[in-house]
Image (tube, rainbow, N blue to C red):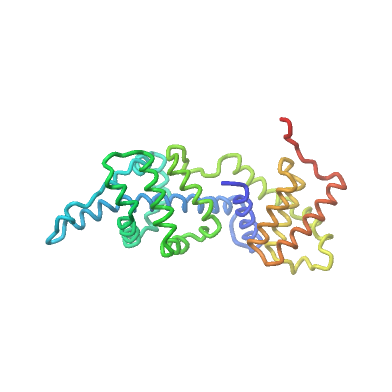
Amino acid sequence: MNRRNIRIKVMQVLYMLESKIQGSSTSLLNKEFDKTRNLFVFLVHLIHQVALYAEVESQQRASKNLPNSADLSVNIKIAGNLIVWQTLESESFKKVVELVKPQQWIEEDYVKNLFRQLSESNEYKTYILEESRDKSKEKEILKFIFGTIILGSENAVDYIDEHFTNWEDEGDMMIGFVLNYIQKPAAIDFHDLVGDEKMKFANDLLQTAIDKKSISEEIIKPKLNNWDPERIAMIDMILLRLGVCELVYFDTIPTKVTINEYIDLAKEYSTEQSGHFVNGILDSIHKELVGNGKIQKVSFKGK
């Protein structure tokens, strides 16, 4: 998870707090990270279920009243995919499945339709013709299931979006997570996708924005000119507060990075004019803070 995703989560928690949604800042932030973990576990679980459905298909066809030769010879190679079983047998994944219960979001018809699409593809037909289990090909077929069968299906993406409100915000990040998992399954910590350093940044940014709210607003308000602070979009004010906090209190983050990040978030999450508005206000604040010697950034050049 990168810092941009963390900034989004902190922004969302501050929005919830400003909207009087009940819960402590820490618990709300943890719930946001839980949503990320749940979505990731669901996607991995879904890939597994599509692969394992080969056995279900085989059993169902073989149990027909009058099965033909094709019904009795369904290839189930993919159900024994090395990556799938490496994950299914890992204690880490077993525990996270028990915690998250991704099966609650799985419908058999949904999996069946995905498997049927897979079984009709040339990639799948080529895969099952290979008797050996080359690890690179085991990975490639899972990438195909995820990237083409799941993400390439409008119905499948709608299904994910319907069950996970964070898919729209985190879809690109999830694609990266899943591809990293397929490439190096043993390296994935399903319980902690953030890491200690990024979690500390998230908590520090959130707490600083809360603790320094009055100070940051005192810095922002003189720059608003004819704007009434009460009529500024809540998201814009939250982004400005976060930007000021990073400029003043986070000495290892370059000022240009901070300003550009919050301009981009304003464009994506607020009004059409918000990117220009946030840019102008933060740039003005930055120049004043630099002039007053209130921004002291740590330089790592030469280290």
On the rendered image, what quadrant is the C terminus found in? Answer: top right
Position of residue 46 measured from the top left corner of the image (x, y, whole percent) = 38, 53
Depth check: 89 or 63 in front?
A: 63
- In this view, 240 is above or below 81: below
The residue shown at (51%, 52%) is 36
Residue that lies at the very extreme toward the top in this rendered image: 303
Quarter assignment of residue 194: top right
Depth check: 175 or 94 in front?
A: 175
Q: Is residue 101 left or right of residue 241?
A: left
The residue shown at (71%, 43%) is 253
The residue shown at (84%, 65%) is 225
Position of residue 15 measured from the top left corner of the image (x, y, whole percent) = 64, 60
Residue that lies at the very extreme toward the left in this rendered image: 66
Q: Is residue 155 left or right of residue 239?
A: left
The residue shown at (22%, 53%) is 58
Position of residue 191 measured from the top left corner of the image (x, y, whole percent) = 48, 43
Position of residue 31 measured from the top left corner of the image (x, y, whole percent) = 54, 53
Q: Is residue 219 left or right of residue 110?
A: right
- In this view, 261 is above or below 66: above
Number of marks drawn: 0
